[in-house]
Image (cartoon, rainbow, N blue to C red):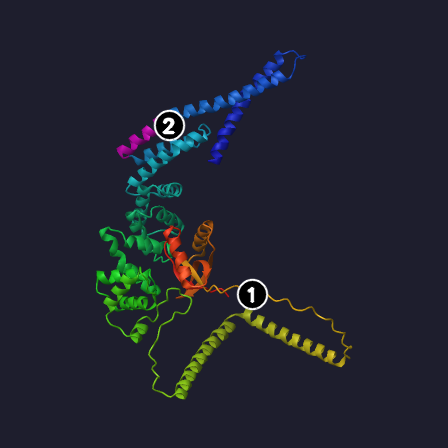
Amino acid sequence: MGIQTLKHLAFKIWTAAALAIPLSLGLLSMMSSSGSLAMPLVLSATFFILFFVVSGWLACQVALRLLPAIIHEAGVWERSGDFEKAEQAYRKALSLYDSFMVSPRIRRRGIPPLVSRVARMYAAQTEQQATAERFMEAYLGAYPTDHEIAENWLQTREYHGGLAADQQDLAVRIGETHVDHSAIQLRLARLYLLAKRTDFPALQTYRRAMASPQANASRMAPDLARVFLQEGRADEWALPVYLQAAEEKAASEALRCGIAACLRWIRPSAHNADQLNRARQVLGRLDEETLVRMSSGFVPPTGSYTIDNGPQKDADAGQPLLGRMGQHLKTAGSEIKDVWQRLHLRVVGQIRRSAGLRRFLTWSIVAGLGAAAAAFLINTVGYLTPTPPPEPRVAQPPPVEAPAPPPPMPYTLQVAAYLKPEHAQHYLENLEKQGLDAYVVQAYGNEKTWYQVRIAHFPDKSAARAFGSSLKEKGIIEDFYVARDQSP
């Protein structure tokens, strides 16, 4: 828009100057030299303004008379099936809108319906060329609310095997714009599933798609369950997917283990009570030891801090106290020895493979020995040098009492988790615009780094839940759970 505005202004200025300057010079030559100079200047300025306005108006009128004929011609070619000629006519109309002849106001009014017609022409084609695909993406980037074109573009991406890397952000924007459009959410969920995405926007899309009233909404549950099982998910995102997959077909052992991990680690609440009851019905009666064994290898909901596993049966209860202590010490010693051996092999192997690291270690040892020798020499000289008498001590003022530390705030609200830091930063900025004390922490689990978005600090869980419920009722966040703050 800025370049087109400059072109239109430059045309009007050039036309006004080309017409007003010769006319002003002619008026000056006709006037006597003894006359006042103010009148010719006023007339020149008047002529310039007049030509400036009239030239722009005439150029716009010419363009407005040419555009309907061009667009009509494009429509004729489009209805006859000659999309190549229709595309040429539409591009001619777009070029006319981008020319110096059209004012910015008329362009803002005429461009949206024209690009919408071009996008629908491309959407009707059986095979879209690269030019058509780029146009559709640019159109959706400017007008993401057009649900018809958005659904068609997602359908095309699904037929072509998924989203490219540079199309992921556009897909997220479409999903956030059409939250209540079930068809778009379903197509977007299938595309995310093809890419095996499990970041926060993808999880939100999966949840909306699974809740869709359409008959084919549940068909993705087994495939999505396999993705979650590969990641070892055991949270409130994964539990409804595991349960729906178990209803679609007989639950496999891996699926039962995923449900067991969710049942072990998800903290009961009012909104997940029904799902937890369904999980118990699928698994049947399980003791605590079996539940712990089945959930081995899965990641707790936070993925970062230790989860309380509840009371467990002590297998060594019948042994004497000294015997149990000795066995625990023996187990701890073997684990420490195993860790030391793995660390030793990794460090030694790295040193053997890297010549630069060997040189660095060699010079570090030489520098350390030199520093130790210098310290020993300085200490010896200081010992042999007589010590001066101590100076009289100056009375120190009484220490000032430090202010009382603030009360502990060990709890926080986690509202999102991403695999990409830029997604977490984007969501963080949205929360900060709402006036919330939000921050991002890194968590590590299942060989992945998660960027968790958290809000505020609270002294207890009840205060955190109350604040999270108020944000959820206001529509600021979609979901949350109370987590332990990891700040030092």
**Where does the image place residue 233, in percent across and percent down from the top left?**
34, 64
Residue 185, horizontal then vertical, whole percent = 31, 50
Q: Is residue 486 rendered to the left or right of residue 474?
A: right
Q: Decide: few, some or many residues near mark 2? Use Cα within 10 Å; few <14, some 14-19, many ≥20.
A: some
Q: Nearer the viewer, mark 2 or mark 1?
A: 1
User: Seen in the image, is 93 located left or right of residue 32?
Assistant: left
* Closer-to-camera residue (462/252): 462
Q: Quadrant of residue 378?
A: bottom right
Does the magenta run of residues contain 150? no
Residue 147 can be seen in this image: yes
x then y, percent, for residue 335: 43, 79
**Could you tell me the amino acid type at mark 2?**
Leu
Front residue (pair 327, 3): 327
What is the span of residues highlighted in magenta in the rendered image? Answer: 66-81
The residue shown at (43%, 53%) is: 427
Q: Are marks 2 and 1 in contact (CB under 8 Å)?
A: no
- 221 to 14, vertically: above or below: below
- Secondary structure under tag 2 reads helix
Which residue is depicted at the point 47% across and 57% down?
A: 439
Is 318 placed left or right of 398 in the picture? left
Say which mark, if any, is on residue 68: none
Residue type (three-letter) at the residue carrying disc 1: Ala
Q: Closer to the camera, 132 or 7?
A: 7
Residue 305, percent from left and from top: 42, 68
The residue to which callout 1 is attached is 404
Whether residue 416 appears in this view of the structure is: no
Q: Which residue is mark 2?
A: 67
Q: Is residue 244 above or below residue 431?
A: below
